[in-house]
C-alpha cells in the first residue's frame, strides 16, 4: 500500500520545515523530568501565571460575572462582587448579542473594538478607526493571519530581526515564504542599524527574493531592548523607501523597566512624520492581553490595528477571519478591560493600581537581579532588560565544551541548556532557537520566577555554570564575544 | 510607487480565491439593515445563544469560579454557587499550572484530554489515547490545521460533500488545494452513494489531482441527514481502498431529532470492522462545545482525535500547534465539562438534565415546525432535519425570477434570499454558498429561533414566498426539481 496523506513522508513540506524551539527539545525534556518528579522552573515561555503571578482581581470579577450572568439577578451578588465589576459586566454583556456563548462578529465585538480605538487615540494622540481593528485569539493568530495574506511563495521575503521570537520564523516557513534576517547589535544594546537593513534587502534581492514586509518587536523578545523614537523614524523611512509593510509587534508595550526610553508606538511616530509617509506606509500593529501586568496568556486575547491598508484588503482579511467564525469572546472582554481599566474614583481603582503596580515594580527589580546575576559570571555577558520579559545572556563556551557538544550530536548552546536543566531544573531556551551570529551562544530565560525565589535561582545558575566551566575550560580558547 | 504587499492586487492569490458565504453578502446586508433599525432574525449561523438559548447553568458556574478563583476562599461563596460547582472548579484548577491565565500545553491540558479520551471510550466501547487528542479553539481551527498538514498544492484533492459547510471549501482554497466534490442525493434524504465517490475520484485523477482525504459531516450541515452505520462502513471501505484520510466532522453528534438513526461515530464503525481496516484507515474526528445542547460558540472550544496517525506526524501537528502557544484555557474547561457532565446524585444533576433536555426537545419540535412550514409552500420541498441545526429547503424558482436575478447581477438564490431578508428580516444563506447541483436552488436556515417565535417566522416566510411567486410566476416553467 502506498503512503497515506498523514504519513510523515507525505505531509506538506512547509509543515515539516517549521522549527519551533520555545516548546522544542528543552521543553520536552523538562516536561519529562517534571513527570519523573523533578522540580522544574519553567522560564522557557513568557507565561507569568504559570510562575505564580496572581491575576488582577477586577477583570477576573467582570469576566466571571459575564460567564455567569444569572448571578446579576441574584440579590446576594454584592456579597462577592463589587458594584463597579457588576456594572462593567452589564456594560460588556449589552455589547454582545447572546453573551459569551455566541459567536461575535468575526472581527470582534464592535463595542470592544471602539474601546481599543479610544485607547490608541489616548496613547498616540491620533484618532483610530474601530473598523481597522480586528480582535484575535492572541497576537499570535493575528500575526499568522497577516503573514498568510502577504506571503505568496518563496519569492516573498519578510525582514525579521535576529535574534527573533520564533513565531515569525515558524509562520514564514509554514506559509512557504522566505525569512530575510537582519541582525540586532548585541554590543550596541541590541540596537538596530538601518544600514544593515539596506544590506539585508540587497542580499535578498540578489537571490531573487522580493522583500515585502518587515517585522519589529518593540520592546524586544528575546533581546529586551526598547526602540528609540529616532530609530523608529529611520525604520519607517526605510519601509517607505523600500515599499515594505511594517509589522509592529508591540505586545510588551507595558513592560518597561527604565525611564530613558519609554515605549512609543510605531503608529504614533508614523503619524508624527506627516505626509507622505503618514498616509503611505502600511503598518499593522499587534497587541495582546498575555503580557504587561495582565499576563492573561491562557485567555488568548489580542488585536491588530491596520494603518494605510486599502479597504479591499481589509475586506479580504475580514473574509479570512470569517472562516473560523469568531475570536473567543471572554478574551475580547479582557481586551476591553485592558484598554479601559478602572478609573480614579471607581471602587476598584485603588486595588487595581496596587496590584498592577506591584507586578510591574517587581518585574523591574527582577530584571535587575537577573542581569546582575548573569554578569557576575566571568564567561557570561548580558545586556540589561529594558523592556519585555526576558534576559538573553551570551555564554562564552570553551572549546572543549563545544567539542563535547559536537560529540553528543548537539548544538553547543542546546548542550549547555540541557546540562543546566538536568543540574538545576531551570528550563531555558537555547539562543539558537531565536537565531544568533555564527559562533556565539546565548540562552533565553524569562524574568518571571517569583521575586523571592530569584536570588536562589541565580545562585543555582552560577553554581552550575562554575562547575560546567571547571569541567570544560581549557584555558586556551573561547567562543568569540 | 509600486504596489505594496497589502494592496489588494498583491495579496496571496489563495486568500482572494476563498469564498465564504455564511458571513457573505447576505450577512453584510443584514448587518446594515440592523444598524438602520430593522429587526433581523439571524438564521445564517448556527449560533444558538445569539437567538436566545440560555447557557447551561452548571458549566457556567464552574468556569466563572475558575475565572475568579479567589472566590473559592470567600466564606460566602456557597451563597451563589452550589457545592458541586465549587468542587469541579477546584478539580479543573488543579489540572492547570497557573489557572486560566497561563498558556497550557499546546495540545491542551493533559487532564482534560484524559477526560475526552474516557468520554470517547464510553461512547464507542473502544479505548482512546489522550496523547492522540488535541484541544483546539473550536473545531474550525482543528480542521484548518489538519488540512494545512495534508495539502501540499493544487495537485492534492480533498473530497467534500456538496452541499457542504463552507469551512471546507474556504480552507482548501486558502491552502491552495483542490476541492473534489461528491454530491449528496436530495431525493434520497441527502444520502451518500459510494458509487458516486468512485466517479468523483476517477474524474479528479483524470485532471491530474491526487485525492488524499475525504470529509464527511455527520450529522450534516447544511443538509441535516444522519449517516447510517451501513453507509459509514461503505465510506470507510472506500477510504481504505483509495488510501484516503477520513476527516469526520461530528460536531452535531448530540443534535439528533429522530430515533431511527442514532449517531454512530466513524471511529466506532472503523473499530467494529476490525483489521486490516481498523489499524490502517487514517481518521481524524472533530468535536466542539459550540453545538449540542451547549451552544457555547463564543467560547471557542473543540478537539480532534487521531486514529492510525503515525507518531512522527503527531509530533509535526504538535509542533504546528505550538506556534500559537495554546488553545484558550476557559474553553478547555468547557470541553472537560461537556464530556464529563454532572452525574446522577450530584447536586446539580437534576437542573442540568432539565436544562439540556429542554433545549434538545425544543430543537426537535422546531425541526418539525420548520420542515412542515417549508413543505406547506407549493414551490418548496424540504427533507426533514434528522440532525444538526439546519433546514435546507429547495426553492423552485420561476423562470421570470431567474431572469430578474440575472438582470440584477445576482445568482438566483442570492436574489431570492435578499428579497426575503428585506421583506421579513429573516437572514438566511443562499444554497449557492454550500454548493448545489446546477439549476436547483436552496436556502439554509437554522432551526434556532425561539420556539414561540417559530410559527410567526414560518408564516412570515410563507407570506413572502407567496408574494414573490405571485410577482414572478409565469405559469410556464420552473427551475428543475
Ligand atoms: C514578541 C511576541 N509576540 C507575540 C507573542 C504572542 O502572544 P499571544 O499570542 O499570547 O498574544 C509573544 C508571546 O510570547 C511574543 O513574545
Ligand atoms: C459542520 C461544522 N463543522 C464545524 C463547525 C465549527 O464549529 P466551531 O469552530 O465553533 O467548533 C461548524 C459550525 O457551525 C459546523 O457547522
Image: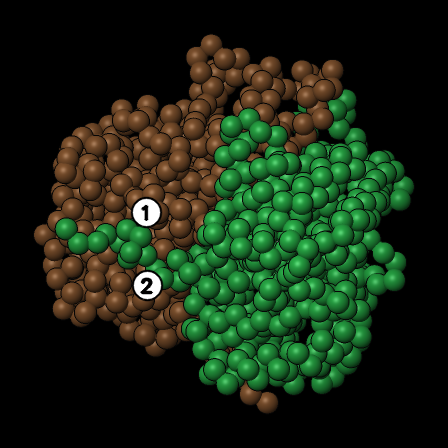
Chain colours: A brown, B green
Marks 1 and 2, the one that precedes in the sequence: 2
Q: Position of residue A36 (x, y in %)?
A: 59, 60
Looking at mark 1, is its residue's CB closer than 8 Å to ligand 1? Answer: yes
Nearest to the observer: residue B49 or residue A456: B49
| Label annotation for residue A93 | none
Is residue A411 rendered to the left or right of residue B260?
Answer: left
Quarter-of-image position of residue A398: bottom left
Residue sitting at x 26%, y 67%: A155
The extreme left residue here reads A195
Q: Residues within 10 Å of mark 1 (few under 14, many from 20)?
A: many
Query: Do we see residue B425 in this rendering?
Result: yes
Residue nearest the viewer, comparing A325 with A391: A325
Quadrant in the picture for residue A127: top left
**Count of marks placed on residues:** 2
**Taking the image as drawn, is residue A189 in sight?**
no
Whole-angstrom CA distance, mark 1 to mark 2, is 27 Å
Q: Residue B18: where, in percent of width, then height? A: 45, 58
Tell me the number on the disc at residue A152.
2
Q: Which mark is residue A221?
A: 1
Q: Residues within 10 Å of mark 2 (few under 14, many from 20)?
A: many
Q: Indicate the chain on which mark 2 is placed.
A: A
Residue ID at (11%, 59%): A199
Q: Callout 1: residue from which chain?
A: A
A179 left or right of B367 in image:
left
Q: Residue furthest bottom?
A: A1
Residue A461, percent across and down? 37, 50
| Of residues B319 and A24, the one drawn nearer to the viewer in this rendering | B319
In the picture, measured across the screen, residue A387 lies left or right of residue A199, that is right
Q: Residue furthest top?
A: A345
SS at mark 2 in the image: loop
B378 to A475, vertically: above or below:
above
Amino acid at each position: 500500500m502506498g503512503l497515506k496523506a498523514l504519513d510523515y513522508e507525505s505531509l506538506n513540506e512547509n509543515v515539516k520545515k517549521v522549527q519551533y524551539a520555545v516548546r522544542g527539545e528543552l521543553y520536552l525534556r523538562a516536561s519529562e523530568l517534571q513527570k519523573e518528579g523533578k522540580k522544574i522552573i519553567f522560564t522557557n515561555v513568557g507565561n507569568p501565571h504559570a510562575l505564580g503571578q496572581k491575576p488582577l482581581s477586577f477583570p477576573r470579577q467582570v469576566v466571571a460575572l459575564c460567564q455567569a450572568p444569572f448571578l446579576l439577578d441574584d440579590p446576594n451578588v454584592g456579597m462577592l462582587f463589587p458594584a463597579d465589576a457588576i456594572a462593567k459586566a452589564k456594560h460588556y454583556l449589552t455589547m454582545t448579542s447572546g453573551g459569551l456563548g455566541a459567536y461575535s462578529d468575526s472581527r470582534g465585538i464592535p463595542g470592544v473594538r471602539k474601546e481599543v480605538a479610544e485607547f490608541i487615540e489616548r496613547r498616540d494622540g491620533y484618532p483610530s478607526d474601530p473598523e481597522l481593528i480586528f480582535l484575535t485569539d492572541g497576537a499570535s493568530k493575528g500575526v499568522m493571519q497577516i503573514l498568510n495574506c502577504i506571503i505568496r511563495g518563496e519569492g516573498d521575503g519578510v525582514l525579521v530581526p535576529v535574534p527573533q521570537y520564533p513565531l515569525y520564523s515558524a509562520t514564514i516557513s509554514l506559509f512557504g515564504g522566505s525569512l530575510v534576517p537582519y541582525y540586532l547589535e548585541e554590543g550596541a544594546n541590541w540596537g538596530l542599524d538601518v544600514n544593515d537593513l539596506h544590506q539585508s534587502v540587497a542580499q535578498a534581492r540578489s537571490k531573487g527574493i522580493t522583500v515585502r514586509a518587515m517585522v519589529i518587536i518593540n520592546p524586544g523578545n528575546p533581546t529586551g531592548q526598547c526602540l528609540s523614537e529616532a530609530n523608529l523614524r529611520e525604520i519607517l523611512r526605510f519601509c517607505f523607501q523600500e515599499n515594505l509593510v511594517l509589522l509592529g509587534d508591540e505586545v510588551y508595550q507595558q513592560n518597561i523597566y527604565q525611564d530613558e526610553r519609554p515605549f512609543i508606538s510605531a503608529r504614533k511616530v508614523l503619524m508624527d512624520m506627516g505626509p507622505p509617509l503618514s498616509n503611505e506606509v502600511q503598518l499593522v500593529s499587534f497587541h495582546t492581553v498575555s503580557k504587561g501586568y495582565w499576563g492573561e496568556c491562557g485567555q488568548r486575547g489580542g488585536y491588530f490595528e491596520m494603518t494605510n491598508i486599502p479597504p479591499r484588503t481589509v475586506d479580504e482579511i475580514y473574509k479570512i477571519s470569517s472562516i473560523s467564525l469568531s475570536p473567543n469572546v471572554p478574551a475580547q472582554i479582557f481586551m476591553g478591560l485592558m484598554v479601559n481599566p478602572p478609573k480614579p474614583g471607581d471602587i476598584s481603582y485603588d486595588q487595581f493600581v496596587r496590584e498592577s503596580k506591584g507586578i510591574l515594580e517587581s518585574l523591574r527589580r527582577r530584571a535587575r537581579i537577573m542581569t546582575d546575576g548573569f554578569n557576575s559570571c566571568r564567561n557570561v555577558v548580558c545586556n540589561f532588560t529594558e523592556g519585555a520579559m526576558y534576559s538573553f545572556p551570551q555564554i562564552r563556551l570553551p572549546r572543549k565544551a563545544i567539542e563535547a557538544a559536537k560529540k553528543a550530536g548537539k548544538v553547543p548552546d542546546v548542550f549547555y541548556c540541557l546540562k543546566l536543566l538536568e543540574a538545576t531544573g531551570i528550563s531555558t531556551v537555547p539562543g539558537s532557537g531565536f537565531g544568533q551570529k555564527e559562533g556565539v551562544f546565548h540562552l533565553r530565560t524569562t524574568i518571571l520566577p517569583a521575586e523571592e525565589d530569584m536570588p536562589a535561582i541565580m545562585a543555582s545558575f552560577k553554581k552550575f555554570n562554575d562547575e560546567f566551566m571547571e569541567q570544560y575550560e581549557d584555558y586556551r580558547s573561547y567562543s568569540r564575544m
